[in-house]
Amino acid sequence: MKKTLALALAMMMVAAMTLTGCGGSSSKEERVVNVCSWGEYIDEDLIYQFEDETGIKVNYQTAESTEALYSLLKTGAGDYDVIVPSDYMIGRLIAEDMLAELNYDNIPNYALIDDQYKGLSYDPDNKYTVPYTWGTLGIIYNTTMVDEEITSWDVMFDEKYAGQVLMIRNSRDALAAALLDLGYNINTTDEAQIQEAYELLSTAKNNGVYQAFVMDEVFQKMEGGNAAIAMYYAGDYLTMLENNGDLAYVVPEEGSNWFVDAMCVLKNAQHKEEAEEWINFIAGTDACLANMDYIWYASPNAEALEQYPAYYEETYGEPLDESLYEIMAAPDDVLDRCTLYENLPAETLTLYNDLWTKLGI
Amino acid sequence: MKNKLSRLTIPYVIWMALFVVAPIIMVVIYAFSAADGGFTLANFAKMGTYAVVFTRSFKLALIATLICLLIGYPLAYIMSKEGPRFQRVAMVLIMLPMWMNFLLRTYSWMSILENNGLLNQLFQKIGLIALYNNLFGTDLQFFRMMNTQGAVVLGMVYNYLPFMILPIYSVIIKLDPSLLEAARDLGANTFNVFRRVILPLSLPGVLSGITMVFVPSVSTFAISKMLGGGTELLLGDLIEQQFLGGAYNPYLGAAISLVMMIIVVICMAVMNRFGEGEEQAVMM
């Protein structure tokens, strides 16, 4: 019996070594790039187009949320080259030394990115990132189920709409809504303010304001008229609008978050060269136009953003509604009241995590 | 003979060591670790806060198991008494939904139970909601079914019912008919045959059915996320949240998993004691 056990242990180690050994040794002949992004966040034709043009095979995977992606990276479950996290997570990944510096000589299309999206707080020296999309966070509501024009975050905590509100299942955004409603900065590290925001959320939850906490389920619920109010992202609102014309979107007057999702390469990436080729391809004007048309998130590529209304008219034979364009690419007066998330210090992140877990109980 | 057999078990031993024992050891290590790698009991100190979640999960899983048993046992019994043709058809009907991924099936329950979903639309059409409003003087637009504990239990029962029916059925169908004849010869009526002979002999099937329904129910997170709306977390949600959700804290997640595993093991041990003397059919 002892012998068996020893043999078993030995074989276990051999197996473990072969398993881990497999990962690194397959890239000699075939060029590959592993991309991890979000669901419904790319025009998939672009992947085939890139493969045809370069002969590089793209392994395209998705994660549920920024936090889920972080977990995957931390646990080593994801073997990715390119990831597309949001601003504050990029700040965190840089701080934890998980991203590789890019060689921008390999990414000439970076020049097309509007200066407005460069040098932002998460990557002040533009060493790690190429922006992919940007947009705003706001309130989506069904005009047939709400008899007022919504302009404030108040509705997310108002008992008047008990059982009709969908809260976002993401600690950063949920607490941001509460912080904004209280008139605080979304990047505050003041524990008392964050506690107060938590109380606001928790009271609303206990009063039955929230029908559910949702991420991707929001589409089915809002499109089907199952809930009246939700907070979500502008680009996704436009997707929902295609299926339910009664929906409206507002960036509340107290302000909101505007975000940039950017492409970065991981420090331990096996295919850095291919990754940069991919990034360059995606940052190009044609790719940005196709993407914008497919996912309804605004592109940081100045040329593409400017050409989009014409592109839309040409593709669909009708002009693009100006108000829709302004929801996708928020004009300056809206952006002025929006703030970018910043990476929070470790203690604040722990507080967020603890409060978020507590909220669920 | 003995030696040969034990050589044959080597692959299984390796498999178990790699994919069962090693992960459990890792869970234990994580559960007692702090974020900086040192030893700590802090993860367990927090457990009291989650007592509500533990109670809620065990309560819902228990209800679901009970309902499965109440539906599953009679069905399995009736099936075993019918002819082979009925049995085949019934078996296909029970298995058929399982050929489709359970996430998709649960997802479709969402569109059935939603406030504006298929059921509510039906109730609206046949005037049930208006009738209810008239009777009780309420002003409902719909019946709230989605995002309730009831919906979560429904999801559990729907998904795990086959795991109750099949083990019970397979035990009953194999009962030696001569035992039943003997019981009748000795003067037992149908009820007594069932109570004194069939029921005790089918207990191993019942026990494994209970295990196979209770354990996945108590740890589910997909069902509660989709049908419960995340306003009332279950253990599975809480654990998932620590690994993949908004709060990244694998140490706490491992500690909660460990406590849950221990409670489940205790439950199973108690149940095994309960069914002692019967065939060892409980799957552990």
Image (spheres, coloured by chain):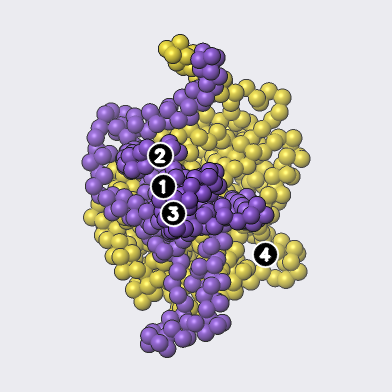
Q: Which residue is drawn at 41% across and 64% down?
A: B150
Location of residue A258 with respect to B241 vertically, above or below: below
Q: Are marks 1 and 3 in contact (CB under 8 Å)?
A: no
Q: Could you tell me which quadrant the C terminus of chain B lies in?
A: top left
Are the residues under badges 4 and 2 in a single subunit? no
Circle 2 residue? B278
Circle 4 residue? A309
Labels 4, 3: front one? 3
Residue type at tag 3: Gly
Identify which residue, B179 or A183, lies in the foreground: B179
Whether residue A67 is visible to the viewer of this picture, yes or no, is no
Instruction: Write down the colour of chain A.
Output: yellow
Q: Outermost residue, top direction?
A: A3
Whether residue B124 is visible to the viewer of this picture, yes or no, is yes
- Report x, y in % for residue B260: 34, 42
Identify which residue, B49 or B259, lies in the foreground: B259
Chain that bears disc 4: A
Circle 1 residue? B200
Circle 3 residue? B187
Are the residues under badges 1 and 3 in a single subunit? yes
Q: Are marks 2 and 1 in contact (CB under 8 Å)?
A: yes
Are the residues under badges 3 and 2 in a single subunit? yes
**Distance from the alpha carbon under mark 3 to that under mark 2:** 25 Å
Tell me, by letter, which chain the rendering colours purple.
B
